[in-house]
Each structure stands twice: as C-alpha cells, then as structure tokens.
Amino acid sequence: MTSREHSVIDLRSDTVTRPTPEMRKAIERAEVGDDVLGDDPTVIRLQERVAEIMGKEAACFVPTGTMANQTSIRAQCEHGDEILCHEDSHIVHYETGSPAALSGCMVRPARGEGGLFDEDQVRALHRPDSIHAPRMRLLIVENTHNKGGGTIWPIAQIERVTRAAKELGMRRHLDGARIWNACAATGMSPKDYAQHFDTISCCFSKGLGAPAGSAVAGDRATIARVARFRKMFGGTMRQSGVLAAAAIYALDHHRERLVEDHANAKRLASGLAEIPGVRLDPRSVQTNMVFFDVIPEIGTAAAVCQTLRARNVWMLPNGPQRIRAVCHLDVNAAMIDRAVAVIAEALSAPVPA
Ligand SMILES: *Cc1c(COP(=O)(O)O)cnc(C)c1O
C-alpha cells in the first residue's frame, strides 16, 4: 500500500478505484490483437460475455460510459429526433451536450423523485406524428440513477415505461453504467432489466474497479451501428485486450462484493445523520451513493468539501449545499468510521468560506 492509501479516504466517486494486484495479473496475462482489425481475442471474449450476461445477440466494448450512451443514441436516432429521459440524467448533465453535438438530438426531460418517472409522463411528453414536431425516437432509463441518489428503478416501473414507449413506436436504451449495483441490491439478473430495452450500456470502471471501459449490448444490427459510430467518434482501440482482461476479471470477481459497498454506504449515512448540521435521510440510501445537505450556517458544500479535503476525507459538492459521497472497492468499514469521526469534528463549528 502507498502512503496515500493509508491517509486519504477518497469518497469522490467509485471511479477512483485502482486495479487490484489480481486484476493486474489478469491484465499482464491478456492475449491481445488489433481490435480495429477485429482480432483481439480478449476483446472478443469480453463482448461475447457481456452479450450473454445481458441476454442480447452482441456487444461492443467502448472506452467510456459516455461513449456507450452516445453511440447508442447515434445508432438509433437521426438528427432532429428527440430523446425522452429524466431531467437529472447523466446524459443531460455530464456528457457535455453530446446528444446535440454528436447526434443532432433534442432532449425532452421527464421529472420525478430520485431520477424516476412513470408511464403517464411517457405518454404525456410523447409527441404525435406531425411535420411540425421533432420525432420522439428514444426512451432512456438510468438504473441505478446517479444524480437521483443511486436509486434503483423498480422492475414493474421499468416494465410500464418501456411498454408505453414501445407502443408509441420508440426505441429503448438503458443507461446501465451502474446496473451492477442495481443487480447486487435487488438480486435480479442483468437480463431481467435488459430484456425491456433495445440497447443497454454497462460500465467496468465504476463499482467493478477496472481501469477503463464500458460496453453496449443489443441486437446484431444495432451493435454493428454502435461499432461504426464508436469508430466515427474516435473510440476504436487497438490492443484493448489489456483493458478487456481487467473487465472480464471484474465481471468474475467484483460483482458480488458490491453489497459491501452498499453496506458501507448505509454505515456512512447513519453516521452522517447523527452529525448536527447535516441533513440526510438514511432510508434514501439504496446502493453505494450517499447524498446529504449541510445547513448554510456551517458553510457551503464547496467550503465543507475543501475543509474535509485538508483532513484527508475527499468528497464532491453536488449543489450549493449538497455533497456526494460514494463507497467502493478501495474503502472499508473502518475507513468509513474514520471519515464519520473526521466529518463530525470538522463540522462542529462553521467552516472557513
Ligand atoms: C459514470 C456514468 C456514465 C458515464 O461515465 P464515463 O465517465 O463516461 O465513463 C454514464 N451514466 C451513468 C449513470 C454514470 O454514472
């Protein structure tokens, strides 16, 4: 372990995990080829594995979750089309406007608690066929929902919104960057979710702990288009088997342990809820993410995060008074307890602005 691992408790994101020694061994052993020419055996193996896990015909390995979403959008929409998704979606807030920039698509936002919405909104926001209106082409559901709090979509609600979208002639994409967390929390299989969608993305570099990489699964024709736009967007890689090997290792060894992250998030939430000046309902914590508010009398979220950073507890502001903390492979229960103690001490008086 480096000294940083001893001193810093990094709760900024589950993307901060570093490959474990065993994962590095899998990377070292990886057989590779040139994936642009289609002959990297480890990438091929990963894609087949993801397709099987998702119950789809094919899958495509891409560098990031953003590219997984954007190639899925581009593969299924034309310029001038519209996407229906929650107003707090990752594609709305954190993908630099790429539905507009890369696919010429508008976004029609749905509203609702925790990143969820229901079929009534799908029907109300859908536009009838007309030469005046954008063509509403794609429904996107995000599960778990990141900005919504790491919330899990109930499967019955997924069935309702996707059925409504299908009846309205729309394609359906699942932003499943965090689908592994939903599966670990509910005990459902990825297929249970994926069966309701034409395309599903998943990520290996968040909770699963791989250094990089996501994938999109779907039918063969759609995945061929995803692969075409991956090339167009500059995301086709060469000896990417080194990354695919880490992803395969993560699928084999890091999915079941996500329940530990969920338990640590609950532990963190109940500790935080006891601290004066912190507003948090521990029941809102469904997976590995903890969102909480600090009262203005203590300071802004940014000022609090700065104060905590100086004390080696790293978290990110997510609004003027809102802070996000995420549990992952590189934090354990003892570190959570230490973080709670540090935060309680730091917030016992107003923080410097
Ligand atoms: C992290 C994330 C992504 C995209 O991640 P990249 O940083 O581009 O790999 C997409 N959707 C959700 C819900 C996410 O949490």
Image (cartoon, rainbow, N blue to C red):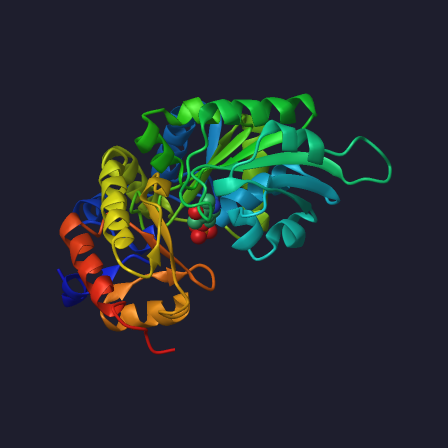
Residue 178's x, y, as percent? Answer: 40, 40
Residues 291 and 133: in front is 291
Seen at 53% across and 22% down, the residue is 159
Question: Eyeballing the image, is 315 above or below 306?
Answer: above
Left or right for 239, reference 107: left
Residue 18 showing in the rendered view: no
Seen at 42% across and 22% down, the residue is 192
Question: Eyeballing the image, is 342 above or below 182?
Answer: below
Left or right for 39, reference 14: right
Residue 44 showing in the rendered view: yes
Residues 23 and 264: in front is 264
Q: Quadrant of residue 51?
A: top left
Residue 134's x, y, as percent? Answer: 77, 40
Residues 84 and 199: in front is 84
Q: In which quarter of the image is the C terminus?
A: bottom left
Q: Quadrant of the N terminus?
A: bottom left
Seen at 65% across and 40% down, the residue is 83
Question: Eyeballing the image, is 309 above or below 267?
Answer: below
Question: Eyeballing the image, is 10 above or below 283?
Answer: below
Residue 125's x, y, as percent? Answer: 70, 36
In the orientation shown, which residue stands out farthest toward the right?
131
Residue 237's x, y, as percent? Answer: 45, 49
Seen at 21% across and 49% down, the residue is 24
How many labels were placed on the picture?
0
In the orientation shown, which residue stands out farthest toward the bottom?
352
